[in-house]
Amino acid sequence: MKTFLFLSGPLVLAVLVVAPARSQEIPAAPSREVRAIGRSVNILDEEGDVVCSVRRGTSMKAVGRHVNEEDLQVQVSARNCKTSGPTFIDRTYVRPLNADGSVNGNAVVDTEGLNFRSRPSANSRAHCTLHENQKVQVIDENPPGVRQGAWVKIRLSEPASGCPDEGFVNTSYLTSTDTYQDLPLTGSQIPLPPPRLESGLGCATGECGKENKNIDQLGEVVGPQNLFVDELQKLIKKPSHRPRNLNKARGMVQLPLCSKKGFIGPFNSFHYDPASPGPVGADAYANPLTACAFSSVLHDWDKQKAQLCPAGSDCQIAWGDISHPNKKRFNGHKSHTRGQCIDIRPIMKGGFSNEPLCHRDVYRGGGKRRRLVCSGAKYDRATTQKFVAMLKERGGEVIFNDPSIKASRAGGHDNHIHVCFNNNANSRKACDNFKPTTPLCPVSNL
């Protein structure tokens, strides 16, 4: 650019030549290379709905950490993950890559009493248990023989006496020591939907919108199915579907609560601790396939309980935490992140009870491990076994520590059943064949 300067007096012409400003280099936005370690890991949109899934070993670029401190914003090049908006992944199921492309396997155990197993399966023998905050090294994020879940092989730097230095754990219970603090914060908290609480034949507020059907209408039998099951099956086929009169968050739906206080669930089931954490029903969000398979269990058990249950046994199914609409980890849970797992109390005589059922008996000498004993005057083991069998028949993977019950074992499951309905042939069959013949919600004011 040229500037001409004219002065009074003798004419002096000054020419000032200004060089064009040098363009400033904009530093590249920080990013990290990460790799999926779960068998099939969900990619989510901003609302937490599933966009697609990536296979174990898929590399992607992390460009931000979500404000919930549980997800990373990632750029995915997989063909099945085409979307215009930002995408996120649960950082539990990825590991950062070192400069040479190898996986940074430094991690810590984030639960007390994690089973350190001989093979990558919940049914394998546990060598010992690991302590919370114990440091480990992931040495194989894709071990052979994994049929279900996200299992990794780890090495212990200081194994306890009698515990080998290498074995397998579920990666859901590990946290990478890398907190990705160099990445910018992104995303926003998903707003908590108001609970849908129904009471008998009317809405809890007394103001059901004319454009919506209330829970009782969803539960009416309509031909071979009802609207509730129909909406679930639509969601299974098309996750982006917006269900009628069902709360949806992070790809999950809230199981209908049939009373003002939230204690009554579908098909005469009992929902214990409905306001923990608040508000009422925030613990009742389930994956659509899980909601469908579990509801089929509740429906059929309620219809058959006269034949299944002996006199004096309260056969009402009591269920508690499933998942939260905007918190992947709540109430101390590590595996209730995506609405596939449900906590259920064993069948009790005389009504619901929250008392511990199992304890370790005294040492019998010889350095042998103490035997777990589950007993109690109120515990109905025989009927509980029938219930567990029905859960497994519908595709449920069951954890319960009573040695007399055919189920997997895990720490912290002495007084309740933990069942997960993953996407398998039996859970899909249970949902496909689910044709309710009784109303979803009874008349109740609890």
Image (cartoon, rainbow, N blue to C red):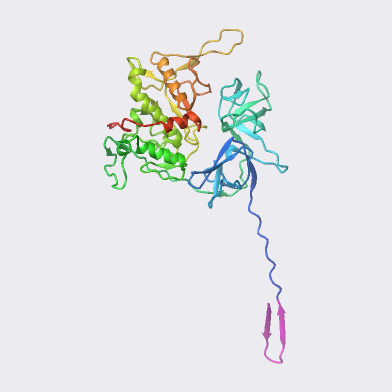
Asked which quadrant contains residue 164, the reply is top right
Q: Is residue 210 left or right of residue 367?
A: left
Query: Magenta includes 10?
Result: yes
Quarter containing the C terminus: top left
Q: Residue 84 location in percent, x, y? A: 53, 52
Residue that appears at 48% across and 46% down: 47
Q: Residue 28 location in percent, x, y? A: 65, 55
Residue that appears at 37% across and 18% down: 308
Q: Is residue 63 left or right of residue 360?
A: right
Query: Which segment did they paint magenta?
Result: 1-17
Extreme top residue here?
365
Q: Is residue 337 above or below residue 28?
A: above
Asked which quadrant contains residue 259, the reply is top left
Query: Magenta includes 14?
Result: yes
Quarter containing the N terminus: bottom right
Foreground of the two, 62 or 231: 231
Q: Is residue 172 left or right of residue 256?
A: right
Foreground of the two, 257 or 293: 293
Q: Residue 442 location in percent, x, y? A: 29, 31
Residue that appears at 67% across and 41% down: 97
Foreground of the two, 276 or 140: 140
Extreme front residue here?
224
Q: Is residue 78 above or below residue 145?
A: below
